[in-house]
Image: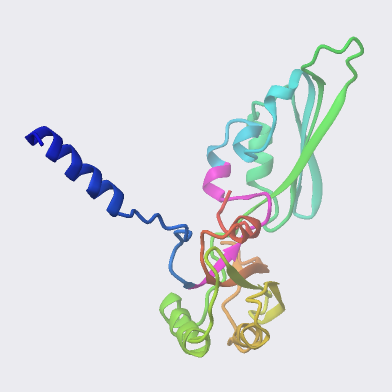
Amino acid sequence: MTFATRSLTAILIILLTTSVVFSTTPISSPTTYEVKRVYKPLSISKSKLANAKSIADLNKHYKADWVSEYKSVIITACIDGVTMKEEGKDDVLTSDQMKLMANADAGTDISISTVYLPDNNLKSNDIHEMGFTFMVNPELNAEFPGGENELNAYIDKNVKEKLVDLDLRPYQLAVVKFTIAKDGSIQNSSIFSSSEDDESDSILLKAVENMPKWKPAQYVDGTLITQEYALTVGDNQSCTSNLLNLEEN
Protein backbone atom coordinates (compact mmCIF):
# COMPACT_ATOMS: atom_id res chain seq x y z
CA MET A 1 0.00 0.00 0.00
CA THR A 2 1.44 3.31 -1.01
CA PHE A 3 1.79 6.28 1.31
CA ALA A 4 -0.96 8.16 -0.58
CA THR A 5 -3.32 5.20 -0.30
CA ARG A 6 -2.65 4.84 3.44
CA SER A 7 -3.31 8.58 3.97
CA LEU A 8 -6.57 8.46 2.05
CA THR A 9 -7.68 5.41 4.04
CA ALA A 10 -6.93 7.17 7.33
CA ILE A 11 -8.95 10.22 6.30
CA LEU A 12 -11.94 8.06 5.36
CA ILE A 13 -11.80 6.26 8.70
CA ILE A 14 -11.79 9.60 10.56
CA LEU A 15 -14.75 10.88 8.56
CA LEU A 16 -16.74 7.69 9.14
CA THR A 17 -16.07 7.48 12.87
CA THR A 18 -16.51 11.17 13.72
CA SER A 19 -20.06 12.38 14.40
CA VAL A 20 -21.02 16.03 14.17
CA VAL A 21 -23.97 17.09 16.30
CA PHE A 22 -25.99 20.15 15.32
CA SER A 23 -28.15 21.64 18.07
CA THR A 24 -31.78 22.31 17.22
CA THR A 25 -32.39 24.16 20.48
CA PRO A 26 -33.45 27.79 19.78
CA ILE A 27 -30.94 30.39 20.86
CA SER A 28 -32.74 32.88 23.07
CA SER A 29 -32.00 35.60 25.62
CA PRO A 30 -31.79 34.86 29.35
CA THR A 31 -34.85 35.44 31.52
CA THR A 32 -35.31 39.13 32.31
CA TYR A 33 -37.52 40.88 34.88
CA GLU A 34 -38.49 44.38 33.76
CA VAL A 35 -41.08 47.11 34.03
CA LYS A 36 -41.44 49.13 30.83
CA ARG A 37 -43.62 51.93 29.51
CA VAL A 38 -46.36 50.91 27.07
CA TYR A 39 -46.69 53.64 24.46
CA LYS A 40 -49.88 54.56 22.66
CA PRO A 41 -50.00 53.37 19.01
CA LEU A 42 -49.35 56.92 17.81
CA SER A 43 -47.45 59.17 20.18
CA ILE A 44 -44.31 61.26 19.78
CA SER A 45 -41.98 63.30 21.93
CA LYS A 46 -42.09 67.08 22.18
CA SER A 47 -38.68 67.34 20.52
CA LYS A 48 -39.75 65.17 17.59
CA LEU A 49 -42.82 67.34 17.09
CA ALA A 50 -40.66 70.47 17.11
CA ASN A 51 -38.39 69.02 14.40
CA ALA A 52 -41.16 67.66 12.18
CA LYS A 53 -41.25 68.97 8.61
CA SER A 54 -43.88 66.74 7.03
CA ILE A 55 -46.77 64.44 7.93
CA ALA A 56 -44.46 61.43 7.63
CA ASP A 57 -42.37 62.88 10.49
CA LEU A 58 -45.44 62.63 12.72
CA ASN A 59 -46.46 59.13 11.66
CA LYS A 60 -43.94 56.66 10.23
CA HIS A 61 -46.83 54.60 8.83
CA TYR A 62 -48.15 57.46 6.69
CA LYS A 63 -48.35 56.40 3.01
CA ALA A 64 -47.22 59.45 1.04
CA ASP A 65 -46.74 57.29 -2.06
CA TRP A 66 -50.49 56.68 -2.16
CA VAL A 67 -51.05 60.32 -3.12
CA SER A 68 -51.10 61.67 -6.66
CA GLU A 69 -52.49 65.10 -5.80
CA TYR A 70 -53.39 66.72 -2.49
CA LYS A 71 -56.69 68.56 -2.14
CA SER A 72 -56.25 69.59 1.49
CA VAL A 73 -54.43 68.69 4.67
CA ILE A 74 -56.26 69.79 7.82
CA ILE A 75 -54.77 69.63 11.32
CA THR A 76 -57.18 69.88 14.26
CA ALA A 77 -56.16 70.50 17.87
CA CYS A 78 -57.51 72.13 21.05
CA ILE A 79 -56.01 75.28 22.55
CA ASP A 80 -57.44 76.39 25.92
CA GLY A 81 -60.32 73.99 25.35
CA VAL A 82 -61.26 75.50 21.99
CA THR A 83 -61.06 73.32 18.85
CA MET A 84 -58.97 74.97 16.15
CA LYS A 85 -57.94 73.99 12.61
CA GLU A 86 -55.16 74.88 10.19
CA GLU A 87 -55.17 73.84 6.52
CA GLY A 88 -52.23 73.14 4.25
CA LYS A 89 -51.92 72.31 0.55
CA ASP A 90 -49.75 69.18 0.80
CA ASP A 91 -47.87 66.95 3.24
CA VAL A 92 -45.30 69.64 4.07
CA LEU A 93 -46.30 71.24 7.37
CA THR A 94 -46.93 74.99 7.35
CA SER A 95 -45.74 77.33 10.07
CA ASP A 96 -49.35 77.84 11.22
CA GLN A 97 -49.89 74.09 11.46
CA MET A 98 -46.71 73.71 13.47
CA LYS A 99 -47.73 76.52 15.79
CA LEU A 100 -51.15 74.95 16.33
CA MET A 101 -49.65 71.60 17.29
CA ALA A 102 -46.97 73.15 19.49
CA ASN A 103 -49.60 75.05 21.49
CA ALA A 104 -52.17 72.25 21.72
CA ASP A 105 -53.49 71.55 25.20
CA ALA A 106 -51.31 69.03 27.02
CA GLY A 107 -52.58 65.46 26.91
CA THR A 108 -55.13 66.09 24.14
CA ASP A 109 -55.30 64.43 20.74
CA ILE A 110 -54.08 66.10 17.56
CA SER A 111 -55.82 64.97 14.37
CA ILE A 112 -54.67 65.10 10.75
CA SER A 113 -57.04 64.62 7.80
CA THR A 114 -55.72 64.35 4.26
CA VAL A 115 -58.01 64.67 1.20
CA TYR A 116 -56.31 63.50 -1.98
CA LEU A 117 -56.43 61.85 -5.38
CA PRO A 118 -54.87 58.37 -5.21
CA ASP A 119 -51.86 57.46 -7.30
CA ASN A 120 -53.27 54.61 -9.42
CA ASN A 121 -54.20 53.66 -12.99
CA LEU A 122 -57.96 53.50 -12.52
CA LYS A 123 -60.08 55.30 -15.10
CA SER A 124 -62.36 56.61 -12.38
CA ASN A 125 -60.02 58.12 -9.81
CA ASP A 126 -62.22 59.30 -6.95
CA ILE A 127 -61.11 61.60 -4.17
CA HIS A 128 -60.11 59.74 -1.00
CA GLU A 129 -59.50 60.75 2.60
CA MET A 130 -57.12 59.29 5.14
CA GLY A 131 -56.24 60.50 8.57
CA PHE A 132 -54.84 59.67 11.98
CA THR A 133 -54.76 60.97 15.52
CA PHE A 134 -51.72 61.21 17.76
CA MET A 135 -50.67 62.72 21.04
CA VAL A 136 -47.50 64.28 22.41
CA ASN A 137 -45.84 62.33 25.22
CA PRO A 138 -45.39 64.08 28.57
CA GLU A 139 -41.94 65.35 29.47
CA LEU A 140 -42.02 63.51 32.81
CA ASN A 141 -43.00 59.83 32.80
CA ALA A 142 -44.57 58.15 35.82
CA GLU A 143 -41.96 57.16 38.40
CA PHE A 144 -41.82 54.48 41.08
CA PRO A 145 -41.11 56.00 44.53
CA GLY A 146 -37.36 56.16 44.94
CA GLY A 147 -36.72 55.79 41.22
CA GLU A 148 -35.48 52.94 39.05
CA ASN A 149 -33.18 51.41 41.67
CA GLU A 150 -36.04 51.05 44.15
CA LEU A 151 -38.28 49.62 41.43
CA ASN A 152 -35.66 47.00 40.56
CA ALA A 153 -35.30 46.12 44.25
CA TYR A 154 -39.08 45.72 44.53
CA ILE A 155 -39.18 43.42 41.50
CA ASP A 156 -36.28 41.36 42.85
CA LYS A 157 -38.04 40.83 46.18
CA ASN A 158 -41.63 40.39 45.01
CA VAL A 159 -41.14 38.67 41.66
CA LYS A 160 -37.69 37.27 40.97
CA GLU A 161 -37.18 35.68 44.41
CA LYS A 162 -40.67 34.16 44.34
CA LEU A 163 -40.41 32.67 40.84
CA VAL A 164 -37.27 30.59 41.33
CA ASP A 165 -39.07 27.50 40.02
CA LEU A 166 -40.61 29.21 37.00
CA ASP A 167 -39.63 27.36 33.83
CA LEU A 168 -40.41 29.41 30.73
CA ARG A 169 -39.84 28.16 27.22
CA PRO A 170 -37.42 29.93 24.87
CA TYR A 171 -39.11 33.03 23.41
CA GLN A 172 -41.88 32.91 26.05
CA LEU A 173 -42.77 36.16 27.83
CA ALA A 174 -45.20 36.52 30.75
CA VAL A 175 -46.72 40.00 30.95
CA VAL A 176 -48.91 41.97 33.34
CA LYS A 177 -50.19 45.30 32.00
CA PHE A 178 -51.28 48.07 34.34
CA THR A 179 -52.10 51.76 34.42
CA ILE A 180 -50.61 54.49 36.58
CA ALA A 181 -53.55 56.80 37.28
CA LYS A 182 -53.34 60.56 37.69
CA ASP A 183 -53.15 60.10 41.47
CA GLY A 184 -50.31 57.56 41.11
CA SER A 185 -52.41 54.54 42.05
CA ILE A 186 -52.25 51.20 40.21
CA GLN A 187 -55.32 50.51 38.07
CA ASN A 188 -56.50 48.07 35.38
CA SER A 189 -53.89 45.41 36.18
CA SER A 190 -54.40 42.26 34.10
CA ILE A 191 -52.52 39.31 32.63
CA PHE A 192 -51.64 40.24 29.05
CA SER A 193 -49.60 37.09 28.40
CA SER A 194 -49.72 34.12 30.78
CA SER A 195 -46.74 32.25 32.19
CA GLU A 196 -48.96 29.18 31.74
CA ASP A 197 -48.74 28.55 35.48
CA ASP A 198 -51.59 29.82 37.67
CA GLU A 199 -49.49 30.30 40.79
CA SER A 200 -46.84 32.26 38.88
CA ASP A 201 -49.49 34.43 37.22
CA SER A 202 -50.92 35.14 40.68
CA ILE A 203 -47.49 36.19 41.99
CA LEU A 204 -46.99 38.54 39.04
CA LEU A 205 -50.44 40.09 39.42
CA LYS A 206 -50.10 40.59 43.17
CA ALA A 207 -46.65 42.17 42.73
CA VAL A 208 -48.21 44.80 40.50
CA GLU A 209 -51.35 45.34 42.57
CA ASN A 210 -49.35 45.74 45.80
CA MET A 211 -47.02 48.40 44.41
CA PRO A 212 -46.96 51.68 46.35
CA LYS A 213 -48.31 54.77 44.64
CA TRP A 214 -46.13 56.10 41.84
CA LYS A 215 -45.40 59.71 41.00
CA PRO A 216 -47.80 60.23 38.08
CA ALA A 217 -46.74 61.34 34.61
CA GLN A 218 -47.05 65.03 33.85
CA TYR A 219 -46.31 67.73 31.32
CA VAL A 220 -44.13 70.72 32.17
CA ASP A 221 -47.24 72.86 32.65
CA GLY A 222 -48.32 70.53 35.47
CA THR A 223 -51.00 68.64 33.55
CA LEU A 224 -51.23 65.08 34.86
CA ILE A 225 -51.89 62.12 32.58
CA THR A 226 -52.38 58.37 32.96
CA GLN A 227 -49.74 56.01 31.56
CA GLU A 228 -49.68 52.31 30.80
CA TYR A 229 -46.84 50.04 31.90
CA ALA A 230 -46.00 46.35 31.67
CA LEU A 231 -44.21 43.97 34.01
CA THR A 232 -42.45 41.43 31.80
CA VAL A 233 -40.77 38.18 32.80
CA GLY A 234 -39.03 35.92 30.31
CA ASP A 235 -37.42 36.25 26.92
CA ASN A 236 -37.50 39.73 25.39
CA GLN A 237 -36.99 38.20 21.94
CA SER A 238 -40.54 36.86 22.19
CA CYS A 239 -43.02 38.06 19.57
CA THR A 240 -45.16 39.24 22.49
CA SER A 241 -42.78 42.19 22.89
CA ASN A 242 -43.84 43.51 19.48
CA LEU A 243 -47.50 43.52 20.56
CA LEU A 244 -46.82 45.71 23.57
CA ASN A 245 -45.41 48.78 21.80
CA LEU A 246 -42.65 49.32 24.35
CA GLU A 247 -40.65 51.77 22.23
CA GLU A 248 -41.44 55.44 21.64
CA ASN A 249 -42.46 56.22 18.04
| Screen quadrant of the N terminus | top left
Q: Which of 6 and 215 is in front in this view?
A: 6
Q: Residue furthest front?
A: 1
Question: Is residue 28 shown in magenta?
Answer: no
Eyeballing the image, is 99 above or below 70? below
Residue 111 visible from this viewpoint? no
Q: Give percent across and percent down for residue 224.
A: 65, 68
Could you tell me which residue is drawn at 44 percent across and 59 percent down?
A: 27
Q: How many labels does the image show?
A: 0
Image quarter of residue 142: bottom right
Q: Give percent across and percent down for residue 206.
A: 64, 88
From the viewer's perspective, is 108 left or right of 10? right
Q: Give percent across and percent down for residue 23.
A: 42, 58
Q: Nearer the viewer, residue 118 or 195?
A: 195
Question: Is residue 39 shown in magenta?
Answer: yes
Q: How is the image coloured?
A: rainbow
Image quarter of residue 8: top left
Q: Which residue lies furthest to the top in this view?
A: 123
Q: Residue furthest left?
A: 3
Q: Which of 192 and 113 is in front in this view?
A: 192
Q: Give the range drawn in magenta.
A: 33-49
Q: Give percent across and percent down for residue 29.
A: 44, 63
Could you tell me which residue is drawn at 62 percent across and 89 percent down?
A: 210
Eyeballing the image, is 219 above or below 9? below
Q: Which of 20 and 149 is in front in this view?
A: 20
Residue 222 visible from this viewpoint? yes
